Amino acid sequence: MIFKDEEKLSPEYVPSRLVHREEELKLLKSFYSSLLSGGEAYHVRSLIVGSVGTGKTSLAKLFGQTMERESIGRGQRIIYVHINCRINRSLFSVLHRVAYQVGAGTPKRGYSDPEIMESVLAALSRAGAHLILCLDEADILIAEEGGEPIYFLSRSGEDNDLGRRVALLMILRDPDYLERLDRQTRSSLGNSIIHLKEYGRDQLLDILKYRASESFHKGVLDDEVLEFIADIGAERGDARYTLDLLWRSGKFAEAEGVQRITAEHVRKAVASVYPTIRRENLAYLSQDEYITLLACTRTLLGGRTNAASMDVYETYKLLCEEKNIPQKGYTTFWNNLQQLQDLGFVRITVQSGGAKGRRSLISLPNIPVNLLEEELSKGLKHLSSLRP
Ligand code: ADP
Ligand code: MG
């Protein structure tokens, strides 16, 4: 038997502890502490930014659980609602979900956004509860509908008898999206921004040790094997990828019917995740994704390790002009980049600090840039054979 509890490695599982995120959890709690002492949710809002697998979603959910639990102990009532904007992509859909979750029922047909909000506030008021509303992957909501939904949600109830009962928590992958919010919303976030940096090798090792102890039987994994996984994971700093490798390694060992996970299982796991850059794979891209990927390689030629997404966007626009294809706006371009990341071609990270503030950086960690650039340039003449 390899697995003790395989569920504990599933993507939905929220661990009861987040190693190396203790400070961030404390900070997050401090932003919302007034709710625990019965204060109003007046201007209580914050933002978590960070690239894939830095623990944003888990941090928010663990925070929500903690707040709900602590509010009971203090005779308050806090309801935490986690909305994934990849699923609920419009304000309308978000409001419906919230109404359902706080027990306001399904809004009547034809209700306007403010009317649905009013029914949510009324339900909260009846229950004597405060709501912490988390908008995860808010990039997508902003891409679809601009900054208005955020403005609407962060001000809900401010001039309403039912009171200020809604506190907001936003999660973004790309800090550039902040620019899309109105100045007031942006400045109200003020210092309440938590940037989760990519995990380093030793942090990943600690995460692996903890999560492995929950999910595998004793003796299945040597420290040496865990260190090997941490080394590989550190190339991305992404806990999701790293834990996926751990789980896959376990599955390979299980399939062989052996009692221990070895480095060879890890290698198999790695090979099963990385897509190889072959012509077959490139043929699955859309024309726009193809040009976007080519823009990434062109920007990175000449030994650069990464480039700002805005620089890649400039290259993209030039390429479109050159090839006579319609340029898309930054939002579509960004979605293409996300798609390319999900396919394993590019890696998007968030850089903090400096005069320019935070920005997104694009890199190609798994692929020799010149080879890919060559391959893509060759394929340009067949561009019209790709899906639009
Ligand atoms: P994000 O939302 O930033 O993409 P997630 O919160 O989904 O990242 O985390 C990815 C995976 O890694 C999840 O399975 C999560 O449980 C795990 N994970 C992330 N950070 C930690 C941590 N500090 N300790 C333990 N597990 C973690
Ligand atoms: Mg997430």
Image (cartoon, helix red, strand yellow):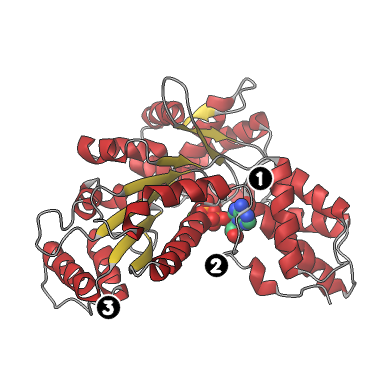
Sequence-wise, the earlier of marks 2 and 3 is: 2
Horizontal arrangement in the rendering, residue 307 relative to residue 224 (left or right): left
- Residue drawn 23% across the image and 80% down it: 105
Q: Quadrant of the N terminus?
A: bottom right
Q: Position of residue 375 (x, y in %)?
A: 62, 36
Q: Are marks 2 and 3 in contact (CB under 8 Å)?
A: no
Seen in the picture, residue 78 relative to 103 is either above or below; the reply is: above
The three-letter amino acid code for the residue at tag 2 is: Glu
Identify the residue shown where x is 30% and y is 35%. 179
* Residue where numbered disc 3 is placed: 103
Left or right: 145, with 297 as reference point: left
| Residue at the image point whose x is 12% and y is 62% from the top | 114
Q: Which residue is mark 1?
A: 277
Does the rendering let one see residue 273? no
Residues packed near mark 3 inside 10 Å, few (<14), some (14 to 19) or many (20 plus): few
Residue 136's disc number: none
**Disc 2 secondary structure class:** loop
